[in-house]
Image: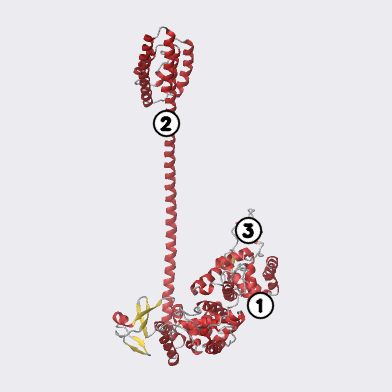
Amino acid sequence: YMDRCLTGQSFIAHCNGRFPRLGAYLEKTPLDDMLEALTARSCAMSVSYDRLEYLGDAVLKLIHTDALLHAKDLHQWIRYLHEGDLSTLRSAMGCNERLKDAAINAGIEQFILTTPLGRGQWLPIGLDSYVVGLNGKTQEENERPPVYSLSGKKVKRTRPSNKVCADVVEAILGLIYLEFGYKASVEVAEDLGITLPDQVETKHEVVELTSAISRREKLLQVVGKFLTKDDFTSVSILMEAVTHPSCIHEEVPCYQRLEWIGDATLCLAAREWVYKKFPELHVSQLVVVETTLVCNETLAYLGMKKGLHAIINHRDPSLPNKLDDFECDMESKDRGLWGTDPPKVLADVVEALLGAAHVDGGYKDGQIAALEALEPMLIAVESELKDHRGNCESTQAKMRSMMQPKQVMYEMAYMLLQVRLWKEYTFAMRNGEHPIWRENKWDKSDHNSNGYVGQIVCAGVHIIAVAESSPNVAQNRACALAVAVLCRSPDLLMSLQQIAARLVTTAEDNEESKGKEENKEGEDKDCEDKNDEGKEEKKEGEDKDDENKNSEGKDHSEEEKKETETIEMNAVNNAVNKDVDTKDVTMNISDGKKDTDNKKVDDISVEDVLINSNDEKKKLDEEKKETQVKVANMDKTNDDRVDVSAITRKQQLDAKEGETEESDGAGDDGSETKDVTMGNADDQESAVN
């Protein structure tokens, strides 16, 4: 307990530093209540944040509704959006991912109590990260000793999950709402960053419509009787609340926006009443009571009793008959809420009127109107449960009688029983041999009837069938009849539960074995993928090496070719410069070509070409040695290229020889011939290049 108290005080100090308004509210809050908002179920304490989170969820829902309604950039067109679009926006604002991020950014997750007190294993919260093991590593890096809950189950020490962080944020809002009201919870939501910023106050536009003057008295009379509020600033908002979507040419939009607002208003009012009225009930039981209060059947019943069906503005030709049938069912048949099939428009109008009260008068007027509208059901529920407080079995039985019959049947039989819906003539053709329950007696199905049949089956086997004129009523009565049979036959119920338990166990075993097989297949596939990747990488490496070798050989061959051509060109130029007969040069190159058909390039001797110059011979010897190292590995292809180059050079020299002889015949002395030969050598060098 001392550890929990210190954690609570540290949380208050943390909030005072980062969120002054939240810190100020928490300082005025009882410490035990604040610790309840920080305690998760995994802590195995007598209290947890579940109930506060249940209330805080409704508080946040209304906060987000007002934020969207009053937002500076949205309030001008929000009234024209469909109810489904508005609900999507609100759900996105309050999703667990967003609340989790807010908790982490605010540093709240470090104060959440999630680990139970294990005898002999307890460590103060916040210090376990500094415990050092024998290996010198911190406690977070070691396998911590096991911790056991009060029930004897082993509990893992883990950080709060995303869901827990989101739930704690909602629990804090619920706590602030209970202690300080709605306005304080809005301020805390703004500090935590979970609502829209830059809100502006926008009042409902007061517009007096010509068509509203004649209906003013009747609207105020009916609505005032239903909500006990007759001080609306404008009748136009009441007209919007009772305008059906089938009215597409009215001066006001339909009730979908107000219905969306009324849904949040009604949710908070119902949850707050249930939370305060039944402090001993768990959240699952609170949900059952709340569902009974706010379901469509309840709201339609209350609206019909107060005469709301008479002021609905619609253009739906089928709606009057539905309203009349529902009114007759309420008056002539004693079947309870689940034995009727009310039109949804009645429940929508009830929520729209509550939304109108919230928009016109603010949060307080909306909550008062919701409690006034629900008053008959609140009295009935309280009277049903007050005599069973303290008796768990009796309370559970009463809760079961308030639940929807289909849900009760599913919970009792663990989904082993299923309900099917048929048209009666279809049921007569396919299952005509089975009797049906109609008007409190057994009967045969009619091939000419246009009614509905609700059938209960177990693993495809027919159990019971009920005929009704409404599909919802047929299903509800069939489920209720099956529940009655199970309640009166404990042995049958036990047998079904045992079968369901075996099926669940078998399904879990199959799921586990399937998971193991998938894991094994995944591991095998990973091994195969790794082997394939290794083979591919090896093959790619070999291919790359081959490419590199080929590329190097090709570059080497090109370099050898260029050097060989350079040697030949130098030899020709040197021969010309030394007044050597071009014919002798050509013949020597030709003879060299014949001798090197099946030899390497290094067998070509330049000495035979330049035998008259000792200096040049020494120079060429040096060049030869350098060339021999580079062209030692030249293949026959390169020899052929050199041969082709030599033949081409021979043709050019033969042509020059003819020109030289003509020049000798035309000139008077050797100098003139020498000039011509030099010019021809320059031209030859240019051509070779």
Give the number of the disc on residue 554: 2
Sooner in the amino-acid sequence: mark 2 or mark 1 = 1
Which is more foreground, mark 3 or mark 1?
A: 1
Instruction: Tell me the quarter of the image containing the C terminus.
Output: top left
The answer to whether residue 442 is above or below residue 85 is below
Residue 593 position in % (x across, y down)? 36, 18
Which is more foreground, mark 2 or mark 3?
A: 2
2 sits left or right of 445 in the view: right
Q: Mark 3 touching mark 1, by CB under 8 A?
A: no
What residue do we see at 30% from left, 86% from top?
A: 446
- Rounded to the nearest angstrom, the CA distance separating label 2 from label 3 is 64 Å
Callout 1: 10 Å neighbours few (<14), some, many (20+)? some
The answer to whether residue 104 is above or below residue 394 is above
Residue 229 position in % (x across, y down)? 58, 86
Q: Amino acid at mark 2?
A: Lys
Q: Secondary structure at mark 1?
A: helix
The residue to which callout 1 is attached is: 179
Q: Quadrant of residue 174?
A: bottom right
The residue to which callout 3 is attached is: 139
Q: Secondary structure at mark 2?
A: helix
Q: Specify the farthest residue to the top.
A: 669
Callout 2: 10 Å neighbours few (<14), some, many (20+)? few
Q: Foreground residue, 154 or 527?
A: 527
Instruction: Tell me the quarter of the image containing the N terminus.
Output: bottom right
